[in-house]
Amino acid sequence: MKKIEKILIANRGEISVRIQRTCRELGIKTVAIFSEQDKSAFHVQYAEESFALGGTALADTYLNQDKIIEITKKSGADAIHPGYGFLSENSEFARKCVENDIIYIGPDPDTIDLMGLKTESRKLMEKAGVPVVPGSIPLSSIEDVKTEAKRIGFPIIIKASAGGGGKGMRLVNVFEELEPAFDSCRREAQNSFGNPEVYMEKYITNIHHIEFQVIADHYGNVKHLYERDCSIQRRHQKIIEECPSTILTDELREEMGEIAILATKACNYKNAGTIEFILDDTGNFYFLEMNTRLQVEHPITEMITGLDLVAKQIKIAQGESIEDLVINRRGAAIECRIYAEDPENNFMPSPGKLEVYTIPAGFGVRNDTGVYSGYTIPMEYDPMISKLIVYAEDRARAIEKMQRALGEIHVLGIKTNISYLRKIILTDNFKEGKVNTQFIEEHEEELSRRPIGYGKNAIAAAAILKYEDMMGNLPCSKNGKGSAWKMNARREGVNL
Ligand code: MV4
């Protein structure tokens, strides 16, 4: 057992800050890394020590394994937390950490490899008694594809073995579409993952995307921290996540939780992970994949269990047991992902300077962010501004709280999806808990209507505050900067 004293966070933005906050609480020193573009980023300012990666391209910066290992050694950090994205599911990187005597806060490299290849993980899960979607082994010829499609029955979905998270998939409804889908899926698999292997699954319709958070220590103890319902997605991008799921009965929750633990044990998993299931309308559920990292939406699980997942990750990595950990759940939590994008222009990313950014607060409100007022969101990275997380005694109160908290965010200078999120949670179906993966498509018309205005007094106040900040407390003049702010706000659909 080695107490971790200093952690390098191999990431940027909100997740770097999120991890550092727990480190600070635990008395662990933090080391941040940054690209050229991120010189003035919040995660750099927050850390005790920061090192420039010296470049702008991803391969030179957040994906530069050797450089990150070198900085870790130079800084004297004894562990690396990979966050999500970037190197977080890269077994080669995890292996390099181990070889260099650096604690990797995550599972073993072999487990990452195993779960990265979907055909391998399917095989393993099937053997362990975990339900998987009816499907095939790897397919190498079009003859095999045709035979398997006939056996499984349409609709089917062709997936890249090395894929995941919605990339490298082809839905096929009729026999004639098989060959072109197979060819293009193989090509995309080769280009995106460097591995052309594909396989086939029965396509399950009318589904809910339910994932179970699990944690496992080094002594064979595995526990689940209940589910997250991530059914509200747009083009495989999750936008709202919640727990508990509205469609799980206590009985089904217990059954899926047990299967999640079984799946975790089957791959000798250690640290925090997520078992992704699809659940159909008739209560059948299937293992889809395992995410071998901390996930974007982990805070909602923290809110309902009261447990700090990053703290658990660190303690597990330094050899502590979770045997005595009792996991309870209480209330309801919802997360909205606030993006710098324009819902009125096909969700085009809207990077640029956040001239005004007000942070929501109050009872049950959590705002995880890596930006600040005056910061320029770079165009090279994911344009997420923040994750707004609310917690309340039940779902109805959580929705009210989310609506209130969304109204407290005022952004000037760039476009955001805030009004779009407000419209989603105002729909009757969302309020009634009728969410599935088709939700966004089925509500397209309703969600494309004119945005709901921000609180007009608050936005005017924010504009005037910003104006006074720039001009030194002069009253707002008719033709000065103040009216430009108002014009901006009007263009965003606000009636000033
Ligand atoms: C599926 C599926 C239905 N049937 N596989 C999407 C992300 C990746 N982890 C796997 N995904 C899916 N795989 C079978 N056999 C449905 C999804 C899926 C989905 C599909 C279309 C639109 C939204 C979706 C959201 C979650 C999961």
Image (spheres, rainbow, N blue to C red):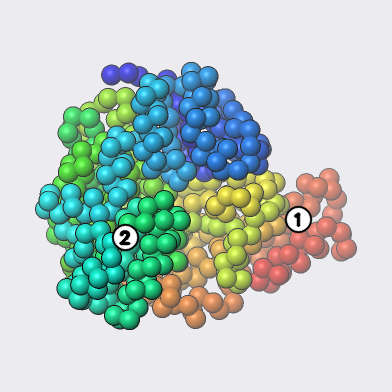
The secondary structure type at the circle numbered 2 is strand
Q: Pinpoint residue 254: horizontal percent, then vertical percent.
A: 16, 54
Q: Pinpoint residue 323: horizontal percent, then vertical percent.
A: 18, 32
Q: Pinpoint residue 153: horizontal percent, then vertical percent.
A: 20, 76
Residue at image position (65%, 55%) is 351
Confirm or reject: label 1 Cβ below 8 Å from ligand 1.
no
Determine whether 81 is above or below 394 in the image: above
Quadrant holding the N terminus: top left
Image-quadrant location for residue 277 = bottom left
Residue 454 in the figure: left or right of residue 171: right
Q: Is residue 454 visible?
A: yes
Residue 1 in the figure: left or right of residue 238: left
Query: Mark 1 or mark 2: which comes first in sequence?
Result: 2
The secondary structure type at the circle numbered 1 is helix
Residue 398 in the figure: left or right of residue 445: left
Q: Which mark is residue 384?
A: none
Identify which amino acid the numbered label 1 is placed on. Answer: Ile
Residue at image position (63%, 52%) is 379
Between disc 1 and disc 2, the foreground one is: 2
Identify which amino acid the numbered label 2 is placed on. Answer: Val
Determine whether 177 is above or below 270 in the image: below
Residue to which mark 1 is pinned: 464
Residue 63 in the figure: left or right of residue 127: right
Residue at image position (25%, 54%) is 119
Q: How many angstroms separate mark 1 from mark 2 (CA)?
A: 57 Å
Q: Is residue 335 visible?
A: no
Q: Residues within 10 Å of mark 2 (few under 14, many from 20)?
A: many
Query: Observer-nearest residue: 462 or 320?
Result: 320
Q: Residues within 10 Å of mark 1 (few under 14, many from 20)?
A: many
Q: Pinpoint residue 429: horizontal percent, then vertical percent.
A: 37, 74
Residue to which mark 2 is pinned: 198
Residue at image position (60%, 60%) is 349
